[in-house]
Image: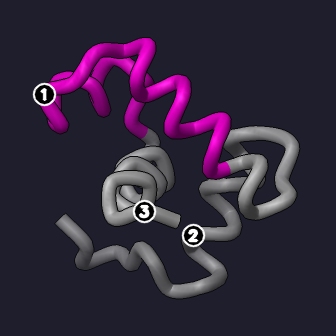
Amino acid sequence: MTPREHHVLRLLARGMSNGEIAAACTIEEGTVKTHVNRILTKLGLRTRVHAAIYAHEHGLVTRDTP
């Protein structure tokens, strides 16, 4: 994954919506959707919930992650 995709995945795993991720990254919501779709494809996952679980299980996000 690209650094931007990693960042989007971490924000997604914190429960942020596409709109919130877009605002945090100063990108368009459509771009966030593209990143999420690429993340799901690259990780072989079906939903953003699976992506969030993956991020937590693989230590990409912790309780202390801002």
Real-space Cα separation, disc 3 to disc 2, in angstroms? 15 Å
3 or 1: tag closer to the N-terminus? 3
For badge 2, the amino acid type reads Ala
Q: In the rendered image, which quarter is residue 57 located in?
A: bottom right
Mark 2, Cα crowd under 10 Å, few <14 / some 14-19 / many 20+, is: many
Q: Which residues are magenta?
A: 16-39
- Residue 62, compared with residue 54, is above or below; it is below
Q: Residue sitting at 42 percent across and 28 percent down?
A: 32
Numbered badge on residue 26: 1
Is residue 37 part of the magenta span, yes or no? yes
The one of 3 and 25 positioned closer to us in this rendering: 3
Q: Is residue 33 magenta?
A: yes
Of labels 2 and 1, the one closer to you? 1
* Mark 3 vs 2, N-terminal side: 3
Please, what is the three-letter code of the amino acid marked with disc 1?
Thr
Q: Secondary structure at mark 3?
A: loop
Residue 2: mark in rendering: 3
Residue at 57% from the left image edge and 74% from the top image edge = 56
SS majority, magenta: helix
- Give residue 25's position: percent from left, percent from top: 18, 37
Question: For the residues carrying marks 3 and 2, which lies nearer the camera in this image?
Answer: 3
Q: Is residue 62 left or right of residue 51?
A: left
Q: Which mark is residue 38?
A: none
The residue most toward the front is 2
Residue 47: % across, % down? 78, 39
Q: CA distance from mark 2 to mark 1?
A: 22 Å
Q: Say which residue label 2 marks.
A: 55
Could you tell me residue 42's position as x and y percent? Answer: 72, 58
**Which residue: 28% across, 15% down?**
28
What is the C-alpha distance between the residues marked 3 and 1?
Answer: 17 Å
Q: Nearer the viewer, residue 33 or 2?
A: 2
Viewer-nearest of labels 3 and 1? Answer: 3
